[in-house]
Image (cartoon, rainbow, N blue to C red):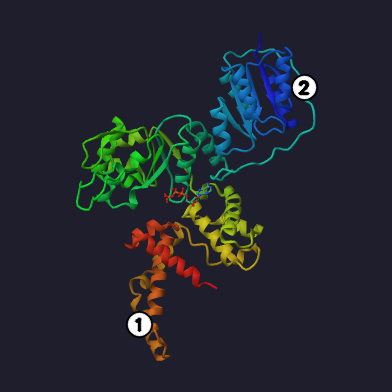
Amino acid sequence: MPAHLWVVDDDRAVRFVLAQALRDAGWSVAAFAGATEALAALAGGEPAPDLVFTDLRMPEVDGLAFLESLKGKRPSLPVVVMSAWTDVASTAGAFRGGAVEFLSKPFDLDDAVALAARTLPAAADTPTAADPAPDPIPETAADDTELVGDSAPMRALFRAIGRLAQAPLSVLVTGETGTGKELVARALHRESPRARKPFVALNTAAIPAELLESELFGHEAGAFTGATRRHIGRFEQADGGTLFLDEIGDMPAALQTRLLRVLAEGEFFRVGGRELIRVDVRVIAATHQDLEAAVAAGRFRADLLHRLDVVRLRLPPLRERLDDVPLLAARFLARAARRLGLPGKQLDSAAVRRLQQHAWPGNVRELENLCWRLVALAPAETVGVRDLEGLLRAGPGATAGAAAAEGDATSDWQTPLAAAVRAALAAGEPQLQARLRGQFEQVLLDAALAHTGGHRQNAATALGIGRNAVTRKLGSRRARRP
Ligand SMILES: Nc1ncnc2c1ncn2[C@@H]1O[C@H](COP(=O)(O)OP(=O)(O)OP(=O)(O)O)[C@@H](O)[C@H]1O
């Protein structure tokens, strides 16, 4: 007997070509325009399938509900879910429902045939079957997940997140600053069986080394000077849920050893404590550093890397997925307008092209910050190339060149300052110090934010000031704008 396959899709074209390709490969195929039809055929005594390809978004019964009824009747039946909407909610929903694979549309027919061959218990070679029917009904978008992207690398990432969310494995998320590593960790949590338990994030680089241990594991009252009360650490707060350790490469050596032990044993003492605390925590770590290089240089423990790096998800920099720029920009412009209570803005096509030529050293965060500024500052509802002038900072290569050219100016900024002071004094300007100090701080802040891709915490750390000071300065500057 040849294996019998079902293709269920409301899009007539997909149904037709996929069914044909599977028949050409030698299987028997029945095609249905919807789940109701397919289930009715089964109830009416038609042959049961050995493998099902189903679309996700269908007008009457969607693919996930269909998947559930199929799995309810035949738990071991392999089902491939297909969709033009590859977002984390869809991929995770499919894998949670028991799908064997998620196929992003459009797909290569050879890939679909290869997938069927891999998935079927045994392949055979006799063609028979039903045929296409009614008119296509366009799929509707209901993408409401926070991680936005429709480029090939992001689709691949969403499929990986959907699959990994179900497994209790440690995940290491790598990628440059501002690429969305924290959002990936949140998505993994949100779609996992731990979703109802806490998601706790800790940025290792943002906490002074001497406080990090108690931040992670908590402390008892009197454990050290200043510890007046018991403090519950992030590991305990995250019990049953997910702990996201950002910038793991910055963890001091002694703590790396302690973390490794806790991950291996699942238990620890609070600082200064005697009670053994047991927790069930899924750890997701992130880094923008090359941890293999850090291991080679003796700055990171190889055994800790192995424990954290059971599965690695790499977030591509935005310059490797410029296709995503229009979609991301539209999202950020709409969000900024909503939050600021201002009219929405759109980019014209030349502005979109200009943004797709930019190198985005600060990645998605830089694009998000740009959109906020455009909503606040661009004069018209349609944003053109001229509105972008001065707002796009140079990429890493260009910055290096510019810095070299600026060599003299950067090493001697006091001379032009003295000239400016003399000119202002000669003009009789009052309160000179206040104005110049404000401008001085603004230059520092802008340069630091440009350096960190708009990351306030890192800018504050680089300048040696508190994050709150950065927020305050940015806030007062925004307030001063017309
Ligand atoms: N794919 C995306 N869709 C929507 N928003 C995104 C996406 N990627 C990043 N962002 C936004 O960009 C900003 C930076 O993202 P996030 O903090 O997750 O980056 P990160 O890689 O963890 O950065 P860092 O390494 O600097 O901590 C956030 O405001 C986030 O909401």
Q: Residue 279, located in which quarter of the rendered image?
A: top left
Which disc, if any, is residue 418? Answer: 1
Kind of residue at disc 2:
Asp
**SS for dot 1:** helix
| Residue 428 location (% of width, % of height) | 41, 91
Q: Is residue 465 visible?
A: yes
- List the residue tagged with mark 2: 131
Residue ID at (20%, 47%): 222
Seen at 33% across and 50% down, the residue is: 205
Tell me residue 145's x, y (percent): 56, 43
Q: Are marks 1 and 2 in contact (CB under 8 Å)?
A: no
Name the outermost residue toward the right.
Answer: 134
In this view, the residue in front, 26 or 338, is 338
Image vertical order of residue 149 relative to residue 171, above or below: below
In the rendered view of the protein, which quadrant contains the N terminus?
top right
**Nearest to the observer: residue 66 or residue 306:** 66
Instruction: Say which quadrant the C terminus sits in.
Output: bottom right
Q: CA distance from mark 1 to mark 2?
A: 84 Å
User: Looking at the picture, which amino acid does disc 1 mark?
Assistant: Ala
In the visual, does 335 lie left or right of 310?
right
Task: Check disc 2 and report its element: helix, strand or loop.
Answer: loop
Can residue 20 be seen by looking at this rendering? no
Residue 385 location (% of width, % of height): 61, 64
Q: Is residue 454 above or below residue 51?
A: below
Give the x, y percent position of residue 433. Answer: 36, 81
